[in-house]
Amino acid sequence: MSVHIERIIGEKTGRYIVTFKDGVMTSKSCQSLVDAALEPIDLIYQWDTVINGFVAKLGEASLNYLQNDPDVESISEEGMVYACGTVTQADAPWGLARLSSDSKLTGNARELTFSYSYDGSPGSEVDIYILDTGVRVTHEDFGGRARWAAVFGGHEWQDNNGHGTHVAGTAAGTRFGVAKQANILSVKVLGDNGSGPTGDIIRGLDYIFVQYRDHGRRPTVVNMSWGGAASRLLDLAVQKLISEGIHVVVAAGSEARDARNRSPARVEEAITVGSSDFLDARMAGSNFGDVVNLYAPGYEITSCGYNDDTEVAVSGGTSSAAAHVTGLVANILKLHGNISPADMQKKLEDLALKDVLADIGN
């Protein structure tokens, strides 16, 4: 069996790190590669201490040779590391500020004077699919990072409702969003009235699955800021995406009842999000229950409007709460690599503040 080449998220050097199995002499194996004379090789470093291997610039022929060498343990692209840096945004909506604050905020929820601290490249090289009413991809807050991916149900290729654009802005807008450098891909499955049949939803999920599978399994997050009655088939489709390594964030729903009776909120493998208000209480309409993994800001959230490329709009609910967490997942993928959905769910629960919210309804 040939050795798989590990691909790195982020900036790459164009070189490869090759390691050998225990007991294999690095110098001897390197010489064997050179002797094979497949193509010119630029050998940079050799080690036989902390790891047993080398770094080199390798062409396709050399990589193929090494992939089939029984002495080779692993082959990985070489990436770059950077001194850690944090950026602070001084004109953020309160929802962003609450993500990076350990304590309750004060002021007015509609003011854009809050501070939000984040890593310097939030969500870079991560794909966020907004499965919704569409996205106004030309809105200035998306900075050219948004594009249309697909439309199902015979709808227009534009957002005539505003829900999808507002959600996308909270997840990944430049000013209003969490993952400020993520790619935004619009998959429209809901109509102008904000609703759509389950079959169109599943078609959208199938499209995302194929794109992920056939295009290098890029770090991917799917936002599903909507819900409906319990549906076994919709749940199965969501579970299929998650089993492949796609991260799915869903809204708990806004009926003020147990989310276990709603799909896809009840999918335990998904990240199900309830909404909190400015005073650190569960929003009155937010669903609750043991399938809710965490709560995030959902009250009077300022984000992108859909009528023109500069419009600002205020909305809320568990849709906005799920959008905040969608962006957070993208940021974590950028920082920690493409970890599994199960590990992501645990990481979010570990990072979340405990015993803070009032009236969470359990």
Image (spheres, helix red, strand yellow):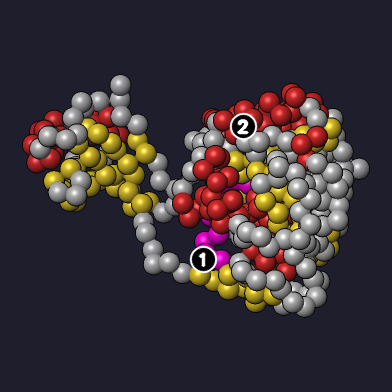
- Residue 121 is a magenta residue: yes
The front one of 222 and 325 is: 325
Quadrant location of residue 240?
A: top right
Q: What residue type is labelled 2?
A: Leu
Query: Which of the numbered marks, if any, corresponds to residue 183?
Result: none
Specify whether 274 is left or right of 49.
right
Q: State the separation of the CA atoms marked 1 and 2.
A: 29 Å
- Residue 105 is a magenta residue: no
Specify whether 164 is left or right of 324.
right
Q: What residue type is labelled 1?
A: Gly
Tell me the residue at 71%/48% (across/down).
273
The front one of 117 and 231 is: 231
Quadrant location of residue 192?
A: top right
Q: Can residue 200 be seen in this view?
A: no
Residue 228, image x, y percentages: 83, 36
Q: How many labels does the image show?
A: 2
145 up-or-down from 71: above or below: below
Q: Residues within 10 Å of mark 2 (few under 14, many from 20)?
A: many
Residue at the extreme top: 1
Q: Is residue 347 visible?
A: yes
Instruction: State which quarter of the image contains the N terminus.
Output: top left
Query: Which of the numbered marks, if any, corresponds to residue 120?
Result: 1
Q: Which residue in the protein does label 2 denote?
A: 241
Residue 109, image x, y percentages: 79, 71
Q: Magenta segment, which residues?
A: 118-130
162 up-or-down from 109: above or below: above
Residue 54, image x, y percentages: 19, 45
Residue 26, image x, y percentages: 12, 40
Tell me the residue at 54%/39% (across/down).
342
Helix, strand, or loop for circle 1? loop
